[in-house]
Amino acid sequence: MEKDFILEALKRQIEGADLSVKGEEIGRVVSVVDGIVYIEGLPNVMSSELVLIERSRGDNKKDATPALVLNLEEYAVGAVVLGDDTLIQEGDVVRRTEKVLSVPVGSQLLGRVVNSLGVPLDGKGSIKGENMQLSPIERSAPSVIDREPVSTPLNTGIKVIDATIPIGRGQRELIIGDRQIGKTALVVDIILNQLNEPKESRPICIYVAIGQKYSKVANIVKELEDRGALEHTIVVVAGAADPVPLWYIAPFAGCAMGEYFRDKGKDVVVIYDDLSKHAWAWRQISLLLRRPPGREAYPGDIFYLHSRLLERSAKLSKKMGGGSLTALPIVETQLGDISAYIPTNVISITDGQIYLETDLFFQGQRPAVNIGLSVSRVGSEAQTKAMKKVASRLKLELAQYQELAAFVQFSADLDEATRRKIERGAHLTELLRQDQYMVMPFEEQTCVLFAGISGLFDEIPIEKLRDFEVKFLDNLRDSHANILGEIRKTGDFSDKLQERVKQIVEEMVKSYDLKKAD
Ligand code: ATP
Ligand code: MG
């Protein structure tokens, strides 16, 4: 009798009550290990959503720690902590933000050094501004209809690249090689060379440093700043000591920052230095999330991850504003093994690769680009006419030289024609050497390489060639600026100009010999 009464009372209380969940969802941390938290009580949370963990430890309890939801499981969700996980403990309250992870984008970021979440690291104050907005780190790539073939060259200022492996704006070109053979030096030079481009069409550069020491990045930033190139550059850093989830986010954040400019019709170059470390980060996160490991213990979606990232680079059609985003991912190989998992993946996603070789580097052939193994599948479409005129002959001469050089190792006496071919090849190889920070605008490269392939330098002894090149360029800049100006303006290298350059070199060679005789 009494029991019925209680039951009736309870029934009356819940009558009319709305039992569907509304308002804020609150979850709780059930475990926290190695930067991975498992959270219960967030049934509607989305993958890639940012959640905030209200920590109960530490001094500043009000500051919630952000975490990124990656695993949606039956009773709990797994998330990576984007910050210090030692302050989080079981039972901490977790709130949804209902937003996917976003980073600030906008022109205020130019000249700044930020972390993967867009927080400034350079001590130059907070980044504010009217047109500052947030952009999700993951966005879908532009569709086929919105794209156009690449048509404008991205001048790198490096002779061997601009001539034999030209890159177009909107292309994806991989830079691959062992450790410490000038991969970073190459991309820093590419950023510096943009100073040779007219201001209105100068590409914006975004350098994403993943897992590198802060001291190394600081040196790069200083170099860029001293040379005036930081103004058109954003540096995104996930340092070696930062939590691995920040390494994972960094390239996506850099890409989102680039997309802002791309969608405004500008040209952007995004450098990912390097994607091997990015793959390690994703492997570590995935293993901690207990996702099944695949080849080399990388998770199965590592290919998808990198293709998703690189597919966002594009040359947009006129209707879409005509902007472009060029991607220059770097991959580190172990002992030149380009058939390892990550190298083959990224090779197959990109439109070509610049292969740096240890042997060349230590022989002093720097930049240590192996021309035979390097390729750019779309860039030659965008190469200027002037460069095309010299490039095809250069490639042929070098290919013949390499073949002959390998062959004549076994024979001492050579006929005159072969000897001359080998001499020419050696001269051209020497011409392709270039010191760090000595970037060269394409009109100057055209003149130098033209003189090289035309045999005008043949009389100069190889050890004097670099000195002669410097004098030749000084002469061109000081007394024949109109020739350089015309090549730059028309993008062509007419027969008339070729004849004039020939005369200039011939005269210089004559007087150079005289000087030597003194
Ligand atoms: P890591 O694997 O550590 O990232 P990396 O491949 O990026 O190395 P860098 O740090 O760019 O290599 O260069 C290694 C060294 O080679 C540096 O000391 C740099 O100054 C030197 N170097 C690179 N390019 C050239 C060059 N063209 N001429 C002379 N020295 C160079
Ligand atoms: Mg490097």
Image (tube, grey):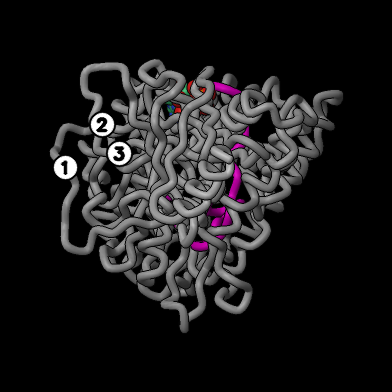
The amino acid type of the residue labelled 1 equals: Ser
- Nearer mark to the viewer, of 3 and 1: 1
Q: Quickly name the residue at label 1.
A: 126
- Name the disc covering residue 63, or none: 2
Tag 3 residue: 114
Q: Is residue 160 magenta?
A: yes
Q: Amino acid at mark 3?
A: Val
Q: Is residue 164 visible?
A: no
Left or right position of 126 against 241: left
Report the residue at 78% width, 33% height from top: 339
Q: Is residue 384 above or below residue 205?
A: below
Question: Which secondary structure dominates the residues rendered in magenta?
Answer: loop
**Magenta range:** 155-180
Q: Secondary structure at mark 3?
A: strand
- Residue positioned 30% across, 26% down in the render: 219
Q: Is residue 307 above or below residue 489?
A: above
Quarter occupied by residue 144:
bottom right
Q: Earlier in the sequence, mark 3 or mark 1?
A: 3
- Is residue 218 in view? yes
Does the residue tagged 3 have its C-beta within 8 Å of any atom of ligand 2? no
